[in-house]
Amino acid sequence: MTAPTVGILLAAGAGTRFGGDKLLAPLHGRPLVLHALAALQTAVDGVIAAVRPGDDALRAILHAAGARVVICPQAADGMGHSLACAARQVPAGHQGLVALGDMPAIQPGTMRRVREALEAGAAIAVPVYCGRRGHPVGFAAQVVPALTALGGDQGARALLLQHRGEVLEVPVDDAGIVADVDTPADLASVGARPRPANC
């Protein structure tokens, strides 16, 4: 029997380069963050969403869409703190699938392929498109506790380096795994650009 899988959606950034409220920006008629959440929900047994203090509108939207929302007091200190904050809420014995709230173009099938890699025995699973690693990143149950000690703005990058021999790369035909939204131009590009068929 495989371990249950919890999705961790990182949605605690300030969106400074975007001009604020990035995750609530409309994309195809609904907030950007809900595209990322919906894709993640297809592959997990529940989602924990990390938000920064005071972001009440985002918190309400994520909660209404079915996510368990946690407020991360140190969110301003970097993604690593937000990831650690959310990881502390993952029940023992559960796998984790970490996704970013500003990556709305990842295909649901990619989410499921990363989970399947964990279920097949990978300690860490990372999707790869055209030679580039992206999200979501999957962590087996025995690795999830290490996420709780992260800090800074590097997310889980140090952990992937530390466990480099245990990282399984999962080839996918999904440009969305490397398409994050940092600026209004990025949002327009994600909304209008067809996914490339090849590299």
Image: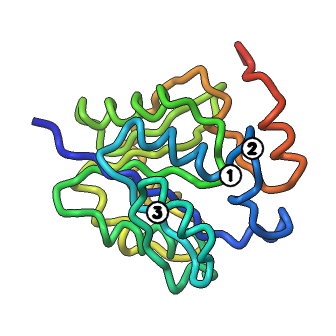
Q: Which amino acid does label 1 sit on?
A: Pro
| Mark number displayed over residue 27 | 2
How far is disc 2 from disc 1 in space, using C-alphas? Answer: 6 Å
Q: Nearer the viewer, residue 138 or 25?
A: 25
Q: Position of residue 15 (x, y in %)?
A: 75, 67
Instruction: Please say if the residues under marks 2 and 1 sit with CB atoms less than 8 Å apart.
Output: yes
Residue 33 appears left or right of 70: right
- Callout 1 environment at 10 Å: few (<14), some (14 to 19), or many (20+)? some
Q: Position of residue 160 (x, y in %)?
A: 45, 53
Query: Residue shown at 16%/38% (left/top)?
Result: 2
Q: Is mark 2 on a helix, strand or loop?
A: strand
Q: Where is residue 138 in the image (x, y as percent from the top left)?
A: 39, 45
Residue 187 appears left or right of 77: right
Q: What element carries label 3?
A: helix
Instruction: Please say if the residues under marks 1 and 3 sit with CB atoms less than 8 Å apart.
Output: no
Q: Which amino acid does label 2 sit on?
A: Leu
| Mark number displayed over residue 63 | 3
How far is disc 3 from disc 2 in space, using C-alphas? Answer: 19 Å
How far is disc 1 from disc 3 in space, using C-alphas? Answer: 13 Å
Q: Where is residue 46 in the image (x, y as percent from the top left)?
A: 33, 51
Residue located beneath label 1 in the image: 31
Q: What element carries label 1?
A: strand
Q: In this view, does 182 lie above or below 105?
A: below
Query: Residue shown at 59%/49% (left/top)?
Result: 34
